[in-house]
Image (cartoon, rainbow, N blue to C red):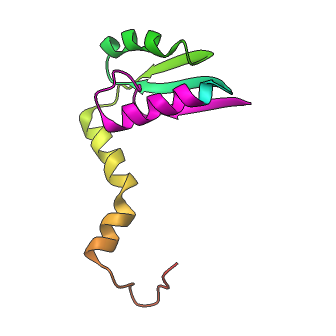
């Protein structure tokens, strides 16, 4: 089976939990499937680590994330807005039914 594995950050070097997890998922999946990796990178320096994933992926495509820190923070806030609102207002507003 062909699998497109998409990461928000390159899963190498193995210095963070999500990178370690994704690297080992890629390594295990590549043993029985054809893997293609699409990943954001935060700097051009990170591009040198893409070669470490070549043995496990048919193709590694890195996209340089050029957004400002403010734009990244806005995206993060938007991703967690629902959870944030539930923590602040645990009871539904009048006329709203919980899903």
Which residue appears at 28% of the width and 31% of the height? Answer: 68
- Residue 39: x and y in percent read 47, 26
Is residue 84 covered in magenta? no
| Residue drawn at 36 percent across, 45 percent down | 75
Q: Is 19 placed left or right of 54 in the picture?
A: left
Residue 94: x, y in percent?
Answer: 40, 90
Residue 62 place in picture, x, y as percent: 47, 19
In the image, farthest residue toward the right: 1
Q: Quadrant of residue 43?
A: top left
Which residues, given as a range, are shown in magenta? 1-28
Residue at image position (68%, 27%) is 32
Q: Quadrant of the N terminus?
A: top right
Quadrant of the rendered image containing residue 30: top right
Quarter holding residue 11: top left
Looking at the image, the residue that sits furthest to the bottom is: 94
Q: Examine the rendered structure and indicate whether residue 24 appears above or below residue 12.
A: below
Q: Is residue 99 above or below residue 73?
A: below
How many dots with numbers?
A: 0
Residue nearest the observer in this picture, 74 or 43? 43
**Is 55 left or right of 52, judged from the image as shown?**
right
Task: Based on the picture, tell me whether residue 20 belongs to the magenta stretch.
Answer: yes
Provide residue 88's location: percent of width, then percent of height: 26, 74
> Of residues 16 and 37, which is closer to you in this image?
16
């Amino acid at each position: 089976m062909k699998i497109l594995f998409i990461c928000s950050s390159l899963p190498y070097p193995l210095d963070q939990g999500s990178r370690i997890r994704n690297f080992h998922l890629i390594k295990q999946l590549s043993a029985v499937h054809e893997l293609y990796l699409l990943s954001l990178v935060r700097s051009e320096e990170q591009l040198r680590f893409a070669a470490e994933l070549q043995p496990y992926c048919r193709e590694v495509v890195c996209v340089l994330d050029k957004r400002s820190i403010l734009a990244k923070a806005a995206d993060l806030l938007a991703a967690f807005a629902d959870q944030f609102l539930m923590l602040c207002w645990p009871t539904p507003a009048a006329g709203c039914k919980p899903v």
